[in-house]
Structures are given as C-alpha cells and as structure tokens.
Image (cartoon, rainbow, N blue to C red):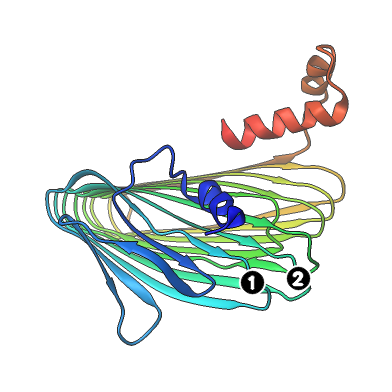
Amino acid sequence: MDKIDEMLLEKVSDLHKISLGAFNIRKNGQVLDRKTTKEIEIVPKKNKSGIDIIVKPNVQNKAVHIPVIITAGGLNDLVYNDFYIGDNSFVTIVAGCGIHNNTNETSTHNGIHSFHLGKNSHVKYIERHVGEGNGKGGKILNPVTKIYQKENSVMEIETLQLGGVTSSVRKTFAKLDNNAFLHIQENILTTDDQKATTLFKVNLKGEKSKVEVVSHSVAKGCSYQEFKSDLIGDNECFGHVECDGILLDNARIISVPMIDAKNANSSLVHEAAIGKIAGDELVKLMTLGLNQEEAEDMIIKGFLMG
C-alpha cells in the first residue's frame, strides 16, 4: 500500500481506534488483504463479487473491518456482502469506502450489504464515505443496506459522509421482529454542486419493536440533499424519525416523511427542521476572535459530530 491507500484506510476504518481482528480490505475492485479468525469467518462468494461474514453464536466484543478504497479513475465497483450474526453475539463492524480520484473519469462504488441478526444479538455498524482527489472525475457512492432482525436483537448504525462525494444515493431497508431495536445516526455534509439522497424504509413487524432514525445534514454551495423516510407499523411498536438540516449559500434540502400505522398500538413520529445557522451563535463565536467562516465551520462541526 502507498501513502494514499493508508490515508484512505485510516479515514474510513479508524484502524488505530478499534482493535484489528477479522478483516477484508478491497482496493480497485480486488481483494488486497483478508484475515479470518476462529470466531468470525470471511468467505468469498463463488458466483459474484463479495463476501459472507459469519459470526458464530456467543461471540463477544469482537470487531470486523471491511473497508473499500478506490484510487483508479473510470472504475465501476459493485460488491455484495452478507453478514450472518449468531445468537447472543456482540460485534462491531467497520465498513465504508474512500475514493481518491485524480483523473477526469468518474469512479463509482456500489456496496450491497445484507445483515441477518440472530436472537439477542447486537451489532454496531460504522460506515464512512470519503471523496478526495484533484481530478474532475466524479466520486460516486451508492450503498444499500438490508437488515433482518430477529427477536431481542439490537443494531446501531453510524453513517458519516463529510464532503468530497460528488453524488450518493443511500438506501436502507429493515424488518424487525419482536422486541428488536434499530438505531440509525446519519451525518452528511455536501458542498459545491454535490448531491445526496437518503431513503429509509423500516417495517416494524414484531410486537414492541422499535426504531430511531436521526439525520443531521449540512448543505453548502449549490448542493442538494433529499431525505425520505417510510415507517410501517404492523404491530404494537414505536418509531421516531428526526431530520435536522442546516442550509448555507444557495443549497437545498428536502425532507419527505411517510408513516403507515397498520395497528392501533403503533406509535410513529416524524420531526423535521431545516434552516440557517442562528445569527446569535455566529456573533457569540466571532466575539471570541473568529471570523464568520471560522465560526460557521465550528458550528457545523459540532452539529455533525456532536
């Protein structure tokens, strides 16, 4: 690996913060390195590009890293990854893709991830997207996440996209059984003429299932963001979606809620707030010696990372 590879891996994988166990590193459409452990098996697919990640039952406090890096222009990468989480297991999965494109050709990564959570299992899933490089070629990332949670399972998702990505369409579909809990925290920054679209569709099938979705987004320049959420309550359940956005310059943010309560005991809530940075916050920081741009950057960083 060269210095660009190492930099991208650091940004999307946090290798220095989370102990390295099982991992699969993919570069420019090919496997760069892979490691399997006795508790977590990584098996390449036979009929298409991708891997099966098999976590055995009763595995506790282990991590899996499956980062993707792209440094070639004109690459259209597609990968299918399936995760099978054994009953009573607790694992952290770190994914994400970094594209460094110095060419005038567009590079794209499409990651299709399916999660099958066993009973009483717990998954923390961290996905980071980074776009860099001085070329005029696009840096496009289109992740699809499919989640199937059995009873009493917990899944926590943290997604982070902080500028540099020309276009992204993020789709998340989930089905929750009895007492299953899904928490999603999304943080997106777009600048210039970048575009980002997010779609969440969650079926609260099981009794007392629960989902919480929190989206923090900042749109600058002439960028465009669209957030769509679709909650379906088939049973006694609770669903809450919170979409907060900050607009600067000539950017635009659209939030589209859909709620379908099919059971009288389902409780589904959607909240959205989109606006500019409050003037008094800017003034307060500028009195400390910051200029307006520095004050805006500090507020945005706190909003997205806080």
View extreme (front): residue: 2
Q: CA distance from mark 2 to mark 1?
A: 8 Å
Element under label 2?
loop
Circle count: 2
Element under label 1?
loop
On the rendered structure, is 192 left or right of 121? right
Q: Is residue 243 above or below residue 282?
A: below
Question: Between residues 70 and 297, which one lies in front from this camera angle?
Answer: 70
Q: Is residue 202 visible?
A: yes
On the rendered structure, is 245 left or right of 241? right
- Decide: few, some or many residues near mark 1? Use Cα within 10 Å; few <14, some 14-19, many ≥20: some
Image location of residue 186, percent across then percent down: 53, 47
Residue displayed at 56% across by 68% down = 142
View extreme (bottom): residue: 47
Report which residue position mark 2 lands on.
103
Of the residues shown, which amino acid type is indicated by label 2?
Thr
Q: Is residue 256 visible?
A: no
Of the residues shown, which amino acid type is indicated by label 1?
Ala
Question: Between residues 24 and 303, which one lies in front from this camera angle?
Answer: 24
Q: Are marks 2 and 1 in contact (CB under 8 Å)?
A: yes
Residue displayed at 75% across by 70% down = 103
Residue displayed at 65% across by 68% down = 140
On the rendered structure, is 243 left or right of 88? right
Report which residue position mark 1 lands on.
72
Residue displayed at 87% across by 27% down = 292
